[in-house]
Amino acid sequence: MSEHRFTMRLDERFADERAAWQKLNDIQRQTHLSFNRIVVDAINAYERDQPHLSAQDEERLVARTADAVADKLQQMLPAYLAGYAAGATIPAVVPTARPVPIDPPLKAATSSDDEMPDFSGSVMDFEFMGS
């Protein structure tokens, strides 16, 4: 098995390289792993978590995606416009609110708690309850 070696140099005059060196030292102190192991793990995690495309591949992917979306929109547009036109010819029905009596008549108080209250004079619509 062949070994591949390289030397990595971080120049502390550059803020990003100084920050990388500090992070590398912090990780090493916390995990007690070698610098090699930390760098290898970081490179493998970066490759696993980040899909990489060349600039040309990315441009082709964007162009193909844009073309696919445009084609689908062109296929859907006639049906959408037909539905819109059909909906535009139907007059809109605006529901009107029921008038609210200013002084609703008072009901006589009943002594039985088992009776259902009468909400017929209410503004609320209780039809959904199936009464």
Image: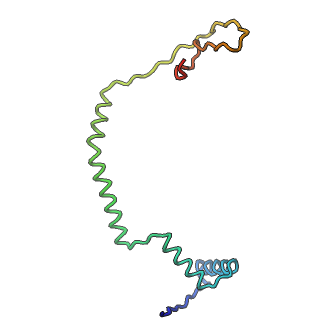
Camera-side residue: 34 or 65?
Answer: 34
Task: Assign the C terminus to one quadrant of the image.
Answer: top right
In x, y percent, where is residue 38?
A: 60, 80
Measured along the vertical axis of the image, is residue 2 above or below residue 44? below
Which residue is at the far front?
114
Q: Which picture quadrant has residue 55?
A: bottom left
Left or right side of 44 for 53: left
Q: How many marks?
A: 0
Residue at image location 32% in from the left, 67% down from the top:
60
Which color scheme does this rendered protein use?
rainbow
Name the residue located 62 percent from the left edge and 9 percent from the top edge.
104
Farthest right residue in view: 111
Against 117, residue 57 (above or below) is: below
Up-down relation of residue 13 to residue 66 (above or below): below
For residue 54, side relative to residue 79 (left or right): right
In the image, taking residue 24 as reference, residue 96 lies left or right, namely left
Q: Position of residue 51 (x, y in %)?
A: 45, 70
Q: What residue lies at 53% left-to-right and 13% top-to-bottom?
A: 99
**Residue 98 coordinates in the image, percent (x, y):** 52, 15
Residue 58, given in percent of the width and then of the height, sits at 37, 68
Q: Residue at x 61, y 10 (%)?
A: 102
